[in-house]
Image (cartoon, grey):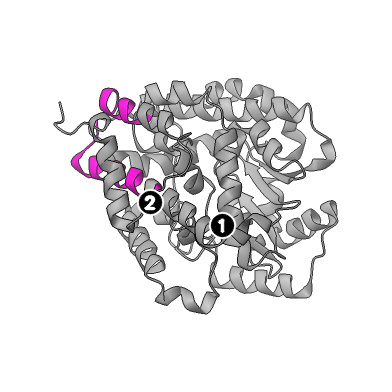
Amino acid sequence: MPSFRFSDSIDAFHARASEARSLDDFGEDDYREALAVLCRSLDDDANLSPLGEIGLQTMIVDALEARLLCEEGWRRYPEAAETQIERPLVIIGLPRTGTTALHHLMAQDPDVQAMDHWLMRTPKPRPPRAEWEADLDYQAAAARVDLMFARSPDMRAIHEIEAFLPDECWNVFSQNFLHSSYEANADVRGYAEWWAHADLRPVYARHARNAQLIGSTTPEKRWIFKDATHLFGPEALFETYPDAMIVQTHRDPVPMIASVCSLCWSSRNAMNEGTDRATFGESTLALWERSINSMMEARKNRDPAQFYDLPFERFVTDPIGAIRDIYAYFGLPYTDEAEAAIHRFRKANPKGKHGAHHYTLAEYGLDETEVRERFQRYTDAYGDVGARPA
């Protein structure tokens, strides 16, 4: 039994964050129940390695620091409240369906802004790009990314993360301790059962609060957000961003599940002891089955014109054409400057830049028949837009 108990350390986590930032305003207390449930599950369910124990402590303190910085940002820059977020583009898709690559490419449009990795960890009004490397928060974020890949070297070939690149919204959701990534890092089954029924409206309210602060220096630019976690809270998403333009990516669930298992295992294996791959595979399958069913239910009550469905194969074979189609579908201007920037990024970041990614279902105790049965409702609904074998 580990001597450290997360549940007994919640006050200490707050104290560490306050000391690190010399701040003490954490904002609304709507995050405390989730933090308590998470800590209890880490104590009762997880079997963290020493590295994992330190890693989860750091994740918690980092999230609390981000809350402090967001609240301080709003205190210092009250004009952030005037920042409007209208018709944001939101990339929603199951993991490993091309969402990261699409996000990175679309964010190259000079008329678009995204959640930069380092600013999600340390929210503030976005400084000019030329000033980032000299910013201590940027330097710390870059060092954390390097440490993460040193800990899990296989991950760089699987999922691209850099301090300067756009990243997933779960980094902001962490400020409320409600997102799916905790399940990738540890066995937190008690927390998982609880958050499946949690109210996500405060999560999205804080998401908007961060976006308003970060984007207050460029209010004229359209926002683009991306995260598979949006699949779990579509009603809260639409309550916060009712005019969101949704780009939903689709892929055959068999290679998708195998790939996401491989991605998450690269973190889980480094941070836990005695983890059973088959148990992990089953929990991962159940998690993403729940997510896609949640989004399918939400789409029943929305205007179909709010959604653009993008087949994985379409994006892989012609990414520029796919992006042009997205812009045309939503009536957005697609400029020569945007296309040139996208081409430059593609040239500098070719597929497989950090190595190949290999994975199979069998490694995680799963088989194709089971996955197809569990996702049959999804493939029946979206088979014509890309949920086919890759």
Q: Is residue 114 visible?
A: no
> Which of 68 and 306 lies nearest the eye of the viewer?
68
Which label sits in the foreground, 2 or 1? 2
Residue found at x 47% / y 64%: 353
Q: Amino acid at mark 2?
A: Glu
Q: Are marks 2 and 1 in contact (CB under 8 Å)?
A: no
Residue identified by numbered label 2: 65
Q: Dividing the image into 4 quarters, which one contains the C terminus? A: top right
Report whether 132 appears left or right of 97.
left
Q: Is residue 294 above or below residue 88?
A: above
Q: Spatial distance from mark 2 to mark 1, Cα to Cα?
A: 17 Å
Q: Amino acid at mark 1?
A: Met
Report whether 62 appears left or right of 213.
left
Q: Is residue 9 visible?
A: yes
- Give the percent coordinates (x, y) of residue 356: 45, 55
Q: Looking at this rendering, what residue extends furthest in the bottom direction?
A: 130
- Give the percent coordinates (x, y) of residue 316: 65, 54
Q: Dividing the image into 4 quarters, which one contains the N terminus? A: top left
- Give the percent coordinates (x, y) of residue 347: 59, 72
Instruction: Name the magenta segment's main secondary structure.
Output: helix
- Give the percent coordinates (x, y) of residue 2: 16, 30
Residue found at x 82% / y 59%: 332
Residue found at x 48% / y 52%: 71
Q: Describe the element under mark 1 as helix, strand or loop.
A: loop
Residue identified by numbered label 1: 115
What's drawn in magenta, residue-wise?
Answer: 38-63
Q: Is residue 167 magenta?
A: no
